[in-house]
Amino acid sequence: MSDIVRLTPPLDDAQIRSLRVGTPVTITGRMIGARDQAHLRMIAALEAGERLPFDPAGAVMYYVGPTPSISGQAVGAAGPTTSTRMDALVEPLFAAGVRATVGKGPRSDAAKESMKRHGAVYLAATGGAGALLGARIEKAEVLAYEDLGPEALRMFEVRDFPAVVAIDVEGNDLFLSGPERFRR
């Protein structure tokens, strides 16, 4: 098993390029939370020549729509959304500077090519563990699109948020290599 790599966004090129598929990571610092509708609005803003409501340089984007806060936590459950839903929407955000996405499940070939082109990675979080992942979010702030409710664009302050490198900058894919290793 690989040692856990500790990431602190914003991520720089050297950090991203050093990550290898299958490596466990923890994230401490800022992550941007967004789902489908927020992605569409961010892309519209970029196409209109507007700035995003956050600095995308080295940003980590978490595909999530958290439930309301419980027991004094910043959010309730905050499990990852199926990432393929955002695959058609990643190119403009990677081009703007986002360098990592966090979600669950495999990614399309087009999304993997976009990651390779822009030097970005995909980190997989554990689906079904929303309550545990929500507890890793220490602060949550709506940055934009409040009308989207749980799908609003959010800034999270996280501590030791667990994930695994599922796709690295070279396009190596844990969803392909993992089962192959098991079959051998």
Image (cartoon, rainbow, N blue to C red):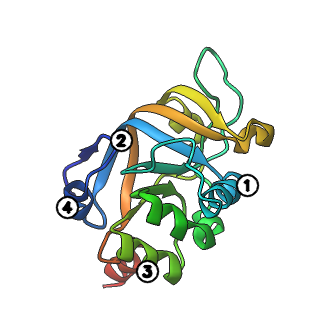
Marked residue nearer the N-terminal end (1 or 3): 1
Marked residue nearer the N-terminal end (3 or 2): 2
Q: Position of residue 10 (x, y in %)?
A: 34, 44
The residue pinned by badge 1 equals 37
Q: Secondary structure at mark 1?
A: helix
Asked if one can make out residue 114 in the rendered structure from this viewpoint, the answer is yes
Q: Alpha carbon of mark 1 to alpha carbon of mark 3: how far? A: 23 Å
Q: The residue under label 3 is which amino acid type? A: Glu
Marked residue nearer the N-terminal end (1 or 2): 2
Q: Alpha carbon of mark 1 to alpha carbon of mark 4: how far? A: 32 Å
In this view, the residue in front, 54 or 102, is 54
In this view, the residue in front, 130 or 30, is 30
> Quadrant location of the N terminus?
bottom left
> Quadrant location of the C terminus?
bottom left
Asked if one can make out residue 173 in the rendered structure from this viewpoint, the answer is no
Q: Mark 2 Cα within 10 Å, few/some/many (few <14, many 20+)?
A: many
Marked residue nearer the N-terminal end (1 or 4): 4
Q: Secondary structure at mark 4?
A: helix
177 sits to left or right of 84: left
In this view, the residue in front, 60 or 173, is 60
Q: Mark 1 Cα within 10 Å, few/some/many (few <14, many 20+)?
A: some
Q: Secondary structure at mark 3?
A: helix
The residue pinned by badge 2 equals 27
The residue pinned by badge 3 equals 113
146 sits to left or right of 119: right
